[in-house]
Amino acid sequence: MRILLNENLLKEDELKEILKELQSGAITWQQKDHTDLIQSMMLHIGSLDSELRDNLIYGSFYELIHEKNLLEHSLLTELLEECLNNLLYKGIEESESDLVFTRTFTSLLIALILFRDNADDFLSQQKIADCKDKVLAYLAAEKDVRGYVPVKGWAHSVAHMADAIDELVKNPKLNKASYCEIVSALYNAILQENYAFIHEEDERILVPIFTMLEHGLEEQELIKLLQELPATLKVKKGQLDVQHHRILVFNCKTFVKSFYIKTNGKPKFAALHKSIEACLNEL
């Protein structure tokens, strides 16, 4: 579905009014033309009006896809194409701009579509592989990792993408050989030196990691990364000024501490937990 500016698409205030009526039950989804309404929601998915963006557009997509399963599989496939090929990369070259809201709420829509595919199985194996490639490329390219932005609300690009990746790794059509690549991408997201993750990004990143562990990821892949982390930080110390190095150390320590807590007291993760403890002692 290519988003085109035309006379049929709603302006933000018009869309807001209709979505409020739909959420209140004053009108039903069956009474509205899905095509123009969905196109308008896609057009304004990154609105700076947090009520419209978070509660109404995302909330409506959640109801339509996750709760009530009202959208046809063909439409969901088109929406995923638009997300992966256009919206997810909109303004990606910018470090801090309002287009981050378009990208990050596109991530949440991708997560919803993948959730629906996990239930209904309508995407091809090739489409899942393509989705994996594009979300990992996005994660590597995203420069704007702000969490909560005053006045404008949640950007939270890393956390939202972790949600999408969690749905991706649950998909039986994903080649499990991709797990190592995905873990590496999530690990690299933690190695952030410009912004301190203070909005539970570490815990959100751990969710798909534990999902992969449950689905066959070898613990040794994680143990290897943990063993390398202290040396990585020592190298970075010689490359960064004090402020940026401290941000990097903070992000890594927070992640490893959360990992420690999540594996503590769980016998099946005993070897991994021991490696996490050893890593913490060196940081």
Image: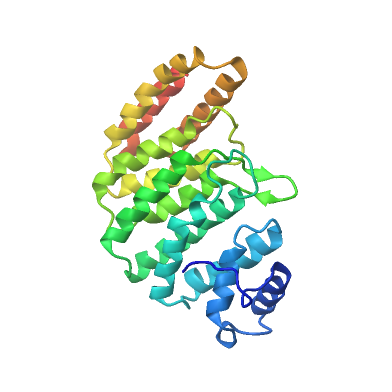
Q: Is residue 263 visible?
A: no
At x 61% / y 66%, what residue is drawn? 57
Q: Residue at x 41, y 62 (%)?
A: 81
Q: Would residue 178 be found to the left or right of residue 79 on screen?
A: left
Q: Tell me how many marks there are.
A: 0
Q: Position of residue 199 (x, y in %)?
A: 61, 41
The image position of residue 75, as x and y in percent, is: 43, 73
Please tell me which residue is depicted at 58% across the width and 46% down the height of the picture.
Answer: 156
User: Is 211 situated left or right of 164 in this image?
Assistant: left
Q: Residue furthest right?
A: 151
Q: Image point 40% across, 61% down: which residue?
A: 114
Viewer-side residue, 203 vs 12: 12
- Can residue 157 be seen here? The reply is yes
Residue furthest to the bottom in view is: 31
As rendered, which of 185 and 102 lies closer to the eye?
Answer: 102
Residue 53: name its quadrant.
bottom right
Vertical arrangement, residue 141 with respect to residue 161, above or below: above
In the picture shown, does residue 197 fall above or below 79?
A: above
- The x, y position of residue 27, in whole percent, is 65, 85
Placement of 260 over or under 65, stated as above or below:
above
Closer to us: 130 or 151: 130
Q: Is residue 194 above or below residue 32?
A: above
Q: Is residue 94 left or right of residue 278?
A: right
**x and y, in percent, of residue 266 in the image:** 37, 39
Which color scheme is applied?
Answer: rainbow
